[in-house]
Amino acid sequence: MKLIFEFLRYCLGNEVDMSGVVAGMNWQRLYGFASKQALLGVCFDGIERLGKEYPEELKQNPIDRNLLMTWMGAAQQIRRQNMKVNGVAGKLYSMLRKDGLRCCILKGQGNALMYPNPYFRNPGDIDVWVNASREQITEYAKKHFELEDDLRFHHLETTMDGVPVELHFFPGIMNNLVYNARLQKWFKRNADLQCSNVVSLPDDAGEIAVPTAAFNVVYQLTHLYHHFFDEGIGMRQIVDYYFVVISDELLVIRDTLQRELKYLGLWKFAGAVMYVLHEVLGLPEEKMICPMDEKRGKLLLSEIMNGGNFGRHFTKYGHFTQQGMAKKYFLKIWRNMHFVRYYPAEALSEPLFRTWHFFWRIWAHG
């Protein structure tokens, strides 16, 4: 994996001597890794650069033509999808603002803007945090959208021009009641600034508000943490977080940030993420938001490599992400019991939160 990780660093714009990497790379294996981790576009961008910067080395270890054509097709599809999602994100943001709702786009197309090439990040749905009450957002959504049946505690789901959209009542949740209450207060306190941080999308696709790096470093960590216990996280989210962490604006608020991470119950997990960012993407220690935690970091890296994007490729834990609802419920509990000694507060709370959420959804659908 060492060569693949070095290649990934190169794709993210780091200075890496690629001579030995190109010579020893198994291109089919790299494609398999990139596909499983939703990084095909990012890695193809790196391959295009190699063609310009290391042509001689590529002649010695060429990429199979069929593989290259398949990869190019996937990268073009990712590019087209990004253009579509950008257009819808701009349109959605403009519509909400015109109707007097303050909001910002979480993760997704805002994260893509931090990449060397914003068109090569695998796009997903559009997550919009609307700074209004649950009742206001639900009322608005019923008037303007076709709603999905699946109402969640922190968002509702719909589509716009064929792109899945989640309208968030608040950005995220934690399983533990105490830490979740603290997190929700933190979100409320920081809401205004996130809705004012307006940026332009590429190729005149419009404007959107996106969170600041200071907000993202906490919010996206809670998102990773929640998914870690839910179904798993992949390398694409780790790459997203890498671009958040390297922002220069974090250097001046590190002490405040560290206090917040401890207060919100994120300190141990942050240390694990720093370890993965260092081992895989070469994050230097001066950019870290807290010290590395090797023990928890190795566990996290192993889960990422096994599960792939959102844990879809897990073979351990009884292939739990591919099971029916009832079986998955118990397999998730069994999986999370593996994490109790590393993250007791969140791991023990996860089955309780999930059970409560199940009954809440039945009640909410009335």
Image: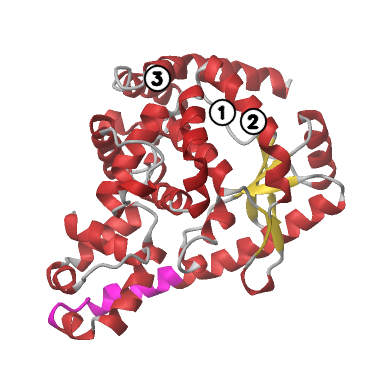
> Is the stretch drawn in magenta largely helix, strand or loop?
helix
Q: Residue at x 17, y 80 (%)?
A: 57
Mark 2, residue position: 154
Residue 89's place in the image compared with 221, above or below, is: below
In the image, what residue type sits under mark 2? His
The magenta span reads 60-75
Q: Is residue 122 visible?
A: yes
Circle 1 packing at 10 Å, graded few (<14), some (14-19), many (20+), is some
Q: Quadrant of the C terminus?
A: top right
Number of the front mark, 2 or 1:
1
Q: Is residue 125 left or right of residue 191?
A: left
Residue 137's place in the image compared with 238, above or below, is: above
Residue 28: x %, y % from top left:
22, 65
Secondary structure at badge 1 equals loop
Q: Residue at x 46, y 26 (%)?
A: 325
Residue 197: x %, y % from top left:
69, 52
Q: Are marks 2 and 1 in contact (CB under 8 Å)?
A: yes
Mark 3, residue position: 347
In the image, what residue type sits under mark 3? Ala
Circle 2 packing at 10 Å, graded few (<14), some (14-19), many (20+), is some
